[in-house]
Image (cartoon, rainbow, N blue to C red):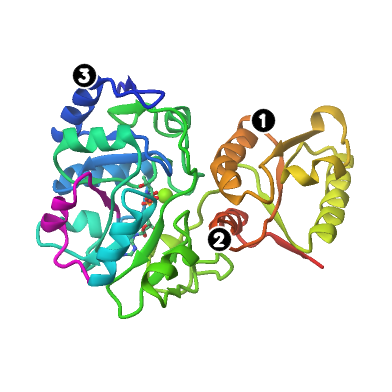
Amino acid sequence: MQTVIVKASDGHCDVDGIKQAANILRSGGLVAFPTETVYGLGADGLNGQAVRKIFAAKGRPADNPLILHIFDLKQLEEIAAAVPDCAQRLIDKFWPGPLTLILPRGDRVPDAVTAGLDTVGVRMPDNDIALAFLAACKVPVAAPSANVSGRPSPTSALDVMDDLGGRVDCIIDGGKCSVGIESTVLDVTRPTPVVLRPGAATVEDIRSVVGEVAIDPCADGIDDCATSTPARSPGVKYRHYAPIAPLVLFEGDPKARLVELSRRIEKLVAEGKTVGVAVVSESLPYLPSGNGERLVVRDMGSALDPSRIAATLFSVLRAMDRDKVDIILVEGIHDTGVGFAVMNRLRRAAGGAVVRCS
Ligand code: TXA
Ligand code: MG
């Protein structure tokens, strides 16, 4: 399959390109598009047959439901059976933005979208190109992240091309995603809203709007939710965000973390391994200098700015793949605010390979 690339960089919408992409989607095709979080792989959300193509292109398990993307609140009427009062307050505060709400499912939503659940995830992205595209599509657009299942989410059109080139009909190139990690997923169908996946809409921010908020035990990325069936959010039970090389995460006291990280770097380099290291800017001066090409160091950004770390996280992991390192060592950050979402992604990418330092 030939993948058409539509250029819409720098926030400018190429109107004809957007129309062309929307026509592809409306006739049952797959279109990858930028959002403020990560690139999505879109299909007509009311067309079950089109939606099933998403699962085939990504190699995604069929029991993992998709988010419907909308550009206008009126679209909620056709996809959600009800909008609870607390959901309305969250919509007023966070939309358009990186918050997905799990709502009671409307009749028109196909089973392929919800994986047969009686709920549906909905979000309005905060990205002009995404909104222009969704408006041109005129239908709710079902879209997971536009990566091969299990890989880090894509934050540029090149990332999408690397994973899905030749497997999707069209990619809208809208440059880099500003947020860089996927939306917060919040279930508002329960008496107390539950965070199923943390994101840039933080637990603290959500609490300030609705009061009490519960956090699903799988949301911190520590629990191995592969065994807890049924998981509330089916997606959390699969290994995720994983680069090609094994990833080891260093958590705990910042000083002890650096000592342990440095020790590991020296050992691995001495063994002849090519080591990828991702640390916060503040740690850069303290790392061993390594052995020329054996050590690839990437700066994730300041520990004081977790939003910036979120914005670079997946592109750093994908860069490590392009550098063909044998192993990736990553320094953890403080897990409050957006840092909680960053640590969720890193713990899951590490798949249990976490070194706790004290
Ligand atoms: O930022 C994002 O959310 C991106 C962009 C493209 O919008 N999308 C995204 O989709 O990350 P995906 O499919 O990679 O992750 C969606 C998550 C999965 O963990 C899935 O299980 C959960 O949301 N989810 C979707 N519908 C659900 C539902 N009805 N009940 C519980 N969890 C649901
Ligand atoms: Mg995903």
Q: Position of residue 345 (x, y in %)?
A: 55, 55
Q: How crowded is mark 3: few (under 14 residues within 10 Å), some or many (20 or more)?
A: few
Residue 296 colored in magenta in the image: no
Q: In which quarter of the image is ligand 1?
A: bottom left
Segment colored magenta: 66-84
Taking the spot 32% from the left edge, 34% from the top edge, the residue there is: 128
247 w.r.t. 36: above or below: below
Taking the spot 32% from the left edge, 62% from the top edge, the residue there is: 90
Left-right relation of 190 to 320: left
SS category of the residue bearing label 2: loop
Left-right relation of 71 to 336: left
Asked whether residue 170 appears in the rendered view, the answer is yes
**Residue tagged by mark 2?**
337
**Residue tagged by mark 3?**
16
SS category of the residue bearing label 3: helix
Mark seen at residue 323: 1
Task: Name the front one of labels 1 and 3.
Answer: 3
Q: What residue type is labelled 3?
A: Asp
Q: Which of the 4 image quadrants contains residue 347?
A: bottom right
Q: Position of residue 63 (x, y in %)?
A: 31, 60
Q: Residues within 10 Å of mark 1 (few under 14, many from 20)?
A: some
Left-right relation of 134 to 182: left
Dot 3 or dot 2: first in sequence order is 3
Q: Looking at the image, how many numbered discs can be counted on the residues?
A: 3
Task: Name the front one of labels 1 and 2.
Answer: 2
